[in-house]
């Protein structure tokens, strides 16, 4: 009888350990334990006056009934525990996945918004710088065009002035040359006239000398 009780207690401990290993609440196992303890108590309190054969038969019958009850309870407990564990795991996994997805999406959105803001800031800065450079380039071009125009105008004015001076100088030189030619011609004419006068004077002097010589001979 002690051996039977020991075996029952050992079976209960094994079932409880298995239930704890699967993570199932041992409520059903506790119920089973109470049933078995009650059964054992009833068997212990039966009259000791009965014959050993009756006790043996009764204990065997009680043991078999207890085993059947224990097996059924254990199977039911395992089934319920498995179902509960599966449901809990599924629910926890779903909740965890939902939380992770929500957290990841929030983080991703925040990061994307930050990057967009950063890119917009960089673009604005780049555009502003490009506009400033374009404005400066336009200003420099305008200034260069103005300088070129001024230089061209001055060069044209200087060229015109030089041409006018050259024309004036050429005209004056031509006039001077013409005047010099006229003076040369006049000088030549005067020289010719002087030569003619000298010749005439010489002829006159010669005639006078001849006449004087004739007069002197006649005397």
Image (tube, helix red, strand yellow):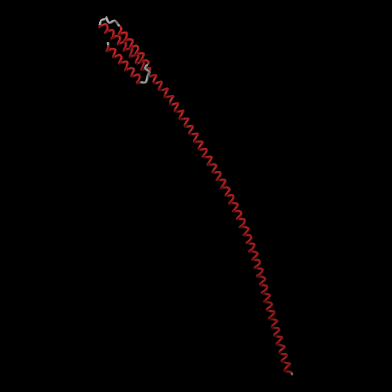
Residue 39, x across and y down, in percent:
32, 10
| Residue farthest top in this picture | 49
Q: Is residue 51 left or right of residue 218?
A: left
Q: Position of residue 166 (x, y in %)?
A: 63, 64
Is residue 132 shown above or below 178? Answer: above
The quarter of the image holding the N terminus is: top left
Camera-nearest residue between 182 and 137: 137
Q: Give above or below for 99 relative to 168.
A: above
Q: Quadrant of residue 167?
A: bottom right
Please report the residue visible at 27 percent of the width from the left and 7 percent of the height from the top: 55
* Residue 21 at x, y percent in the picture: 34, 21
In the image, residue 135 above or below residue 167 = above
Residue placed most toward the observer, 7 or 130: 7
Residue at far bottom of view = 219
The quadrant where residue 40 appears:
top left
Residue pictured at 69% horizontal, 77% vertical: 190
Residue 95: x and y, percent? Answer: 44, 24
Note whether 72 is above or below 162 in the view shown. Answer: above
Front one among 79 and 170: 79
The residue lying at 71 percent from left, 84 percent from top is 201
Where on the picture, by quarter, is residue 129?
top right
């Amino acid at each position: 009888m002690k051996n039977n009780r020991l075996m029952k207690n050992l079976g209960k401990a094994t079932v409880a350990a298995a239930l704890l290993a699967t993570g199932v609440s041992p409520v059903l196992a506790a119920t089973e334990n109470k049933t078995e303890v009650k059964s054992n108590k009833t068997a212990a309190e039966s009259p000791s006056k009965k014959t050993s054969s009756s006790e043996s038969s009764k204990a065997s019958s009680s043991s078999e009934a207890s085993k059947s009850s224990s097996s059924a309870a254990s199977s039911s407990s395992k089934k319920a525990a498995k179902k509960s564990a599966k449901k809990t795991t599924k629910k926890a996994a779903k909740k965890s996945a939902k939380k992770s997805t929500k957290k990841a999406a929030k983080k991703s959105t925040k990061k994307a918004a930050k990057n967009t803001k950063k890119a917009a800031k960089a673009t604005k800065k780049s555009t502003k710088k490009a506009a400033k450079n374009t404005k400066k380039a336009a200003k420099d071009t305008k200034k260069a065009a103005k300088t070129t125009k001024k230089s061209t105008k001055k060069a044209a004015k200087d060229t015109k002035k030089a041409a006018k001076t050259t024309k004036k100088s050429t005209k004056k030189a031509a006039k001077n040359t013409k005047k010099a030619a006229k003076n040369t011609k006049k000088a030549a004419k005067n020289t010719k006239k002087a030569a003619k006068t000298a010749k005439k004077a010489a002829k006159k002097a010669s005639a006078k000398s001849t006449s004087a010589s004739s007069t002197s001979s006649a005397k």
